[in-house]
Amino acid sequence: MRIPPLKAIIAFECIARTKSVNRAADELDLTASAVSHQLSNLESMIGQPLFQRTGRGLVLTPTGERYLTDVTGSLADLSRATERASSRKEVDILRVHSSPSFGLMWLLPRLPAFQEANGDIQLNLACSYENVSFSNGYYDVDIRHGYGEWTNLEVKTVRGEYIAPLASPKYLESHPVKTPEDLLAHRLIYSETPLVQWRQWFGRFGVAGAQKTFDFSFDRSYMSIETAAMGLGIALESLTVASTKISEGLLVPVFGSSQAVEVGAHHLVYPSQNIELPRVSRFLAWIEQEIERGRPDSSGKPPGT
């Protein structure tokens, strides 16, 4: 039986995830030559290359793709086995990582509902701007923002998510808006995060060549949503992420249901074997149930309209 050194497998997984020997070296706190040496030893044991170099950097070979799928699950199993062996009591801990805006604006306000329905599960939530690795088995689920292009993982896209102009009722009372063209005369809040930006939104609804200087600009959705809720302008944001603010009456879609654009921007990501964990399957079912509450009704109206 040939079992490669664990440090070689970890180096391989890290290179595959970061697509760079140098970035893997930084993450593992090793030199680039040491990481390359580990990869070379692993490829020698396997007898086939695991990566090929292209203009875009390192790309997994078909053998590397298969090997990554196998070892990622094995590393996660080792981590969970160690956790179970070292635990002094039976506590079912669900570890979730999320993009900051979704975690802060959507998930955090719903934690009481999750606890009420799943009192035997301890939920640990972490938020950051990076996609986490599942190789060490620490995280069970990652809620990611983007286009859903992740290999070797299960990806469940949050359906029924819409992007639309949002403002506080107080702002709209003082600054009425009737048409998309009217927005050019208003304070607009720019966010780098949404998959649909103001320029695209204006083009879609017939405001051709719209040029606008923004009063506020942010790199995260939760900041633009909070700014709009303060009555400082109009934000173009996800109705799903802003759903709590909408339900509390702090924000409303400026045009109701008529000017919303559907997107697939948030995704539940996890290794395929994690669905076998009851805490994960229950969390995914709960999220689906909560999302369902805010999905469009039979008339096709987006949530909050």
Image: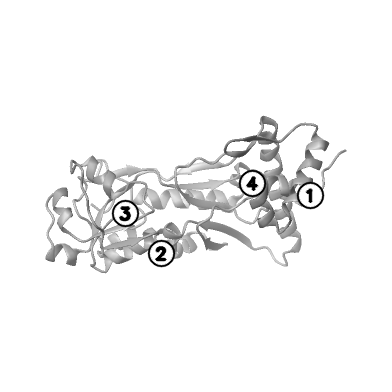
Q: Amino acid at mark 3?
A: Glu
Circle 4 — which element? loop
Q: Label 2 amino acid?
A: Pro
- In the image, residue 61 sits, relative to residue 301, either above or below, namely above
Q: Relative to 152, is 10 on the left or the right?
A: right
What's the amino acid at mark 1? Leu
Position of residue 66 measured from the top left corner of the image (x, y, whole percent): 68, 34
N-terminal label among 3 and 2: 2
Q: Residues within 10 Å of mark 1 (few under 14, many from 20)?
A: few
- Badge 2: residue crowd in 10 Å (few <14, some 14–19, many ≥20): few
Residue 121 appears left or right of 25: left
Under mark 4, the amino acid is Ser
Return the residue at label 1: 6
Disc with the residue nearer the chain's start (1 vs 4): 1
Task: Classify 10 Å Cα crowding around label 4: few (below 14), some (14-19), many (20 and above).
Answer: some
Q: Which of the two labelled residues, at mark 3 and mark 1, occupies the earlier sequence position? A: 1
Label 3: few (<14), some (14–19) or many (≥20) C-alpha neighbours in 10 Å = many
Viewer can see residue 11:
yes
Residue 172, above or below 38: below
